[in-house]
Image (cartoon, rainbow, N blue to C red):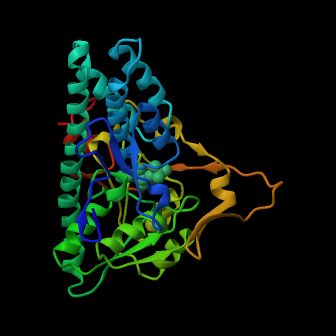
Amino acid sequence: MNRKGENFRTIWLKPGDPEIVQIIDQRKLPHDFQIHDLRSCQDGIHAIREMLVRGAPLIGATAAWSLYLAGLEESTASRHDRVQQAAIELGATRPTAVNLQWAIKRVLAAIAGADDDDLVRLLREEAESICNEDIEISRGIGHHGLAIIEEIAARKPGETINILTHCNAGALATINWGTATAPIYFAHQKGLNVHVWVDETRPRNQGSQLTAWELAENGVPHTLIVDNAGGHLMQHGMVDLCIVGTDRTTRSGDVANKIGTYLKALAAADNGVPFYVALPSTTIDWNIEDGLADIPIEERDATEISHIYGESDGRVLAVNTVPTRTAIRNIAFDVTPARLVTGLITELGTCAATTDGLAALFSSGEHPGP
Ligand code: MRU
């Protein structure tokens, strides 16, 4: 990810101080680029719960680094006990993104049976591997998604390829490159004429505050739209392709993503616009079949809806926009049934959003496959 021409990951060990993990405080973007120190597992829990970090792959990576921080802490309990306790607390931070549980399970498996003396090294190595692998996974998604964009470009030579995305499934949601944005970055770097319609993504505005920011930093042409504009654009032939991310995909290809994704998929189906979901295999929940019945949907604080955050005269403010006695429900995710998904773009290739499609790419039960 670029920022002022400098390449960044979204989480890293502080150079010269291996007891501190550093992140970008995403609550402050796009107004401020602030690096934030995580010095304890509790700091990591806070960062996930309060959304200093967010996006399924980054939530998983932050959990892995938080377990490493738990291993470093001094206490009367054994290191193993501390890490196990931390795993329980971390697992309760956010419900929908399955990468959280996946990363915790993977780290615990890596340290099972290890000596207490070896634990910190193993925790660090596992967190580093999760991050390094995530970057390669995003590259794989970028490569396979690029083929889809190239196919569209071949049908309309010289013309702009308009891609609509929802929420932030960009570099900021992963370790680098992103999932939905990786094909876009690859296409842009290859000189294809891509333009991105960025859904604002109320209530937290991950589209206007994060996706727009990172596309701008990377020089990718884009236009911000309100969440309800996508259907209109599709009716007027102004969208060639939708690509979104996901927080959890069932083995049959149902997709949970930021609230509003389902409505985009419906509009895409009605207008014959291809609707792709870009996902790392770490986001597949092989244990569940029916997304509507079985994916836990996070509900968040009402202030995300009642208040708008923004900058005025150099100061970042939160402004209430709602009568104080009005009830609010802040449902953060929805499920798009597999039948509305044109294809799943994974690090191993693009497949149909079906049990057979996914099984052909990955062996069920394992992350990542095959
Ligand atoms: O609530 P958030 O900001 O964590 O939600 C993020 C999303 O919905 C992303 O689109 C999803 O995690 C895919 S990220 C590669």
Q: Quadrant of the N terminus?
A: bottom left
Compared to residue 122, the image places residue 350 above or below, namely: below
State the residue lying farthest toward the front.
16
Residue under the point 43% across and 53% down = 25
Residue 299 picture location, percent across and down: 60, 44
Q: Which x, y percent locates residue 243?
A: 35, 63
Q: Is residue 196 left or right of residue 132?
A: right
User: Which residue is the extreme one toward the right?
Assistant: 325
Asked if residue 331 shows in the view, the reply is yes
Number of numbered markers: 0
Residue 57 position by quadrant: top left
Residue 323: percent from the left, percent from the top?
81, 61
Query: In this rendering, is residue 62 above or below 214?
Result: above
Give the quarter of the image for residue 62: top left
Work out whether 285 lies above or below 343. Answer: above
Q: Answer with the quarter of the image where residue 128 lies.
A: top left
Identify which residue, 260 or 214, lies in the foreground: 214
Residue 230 higher or lower than 249, as above or below = below
Quarter containing the C terminus: top left
Give x and y (percent) for residue 248.
40, 43
Q: Determine the residue positioned at 41% across, 25% down.
A: 87
Task: Residue at 59%, 59% (x, y): give it.
Answer: 203
Q: Is residue 257 visible?
A: no
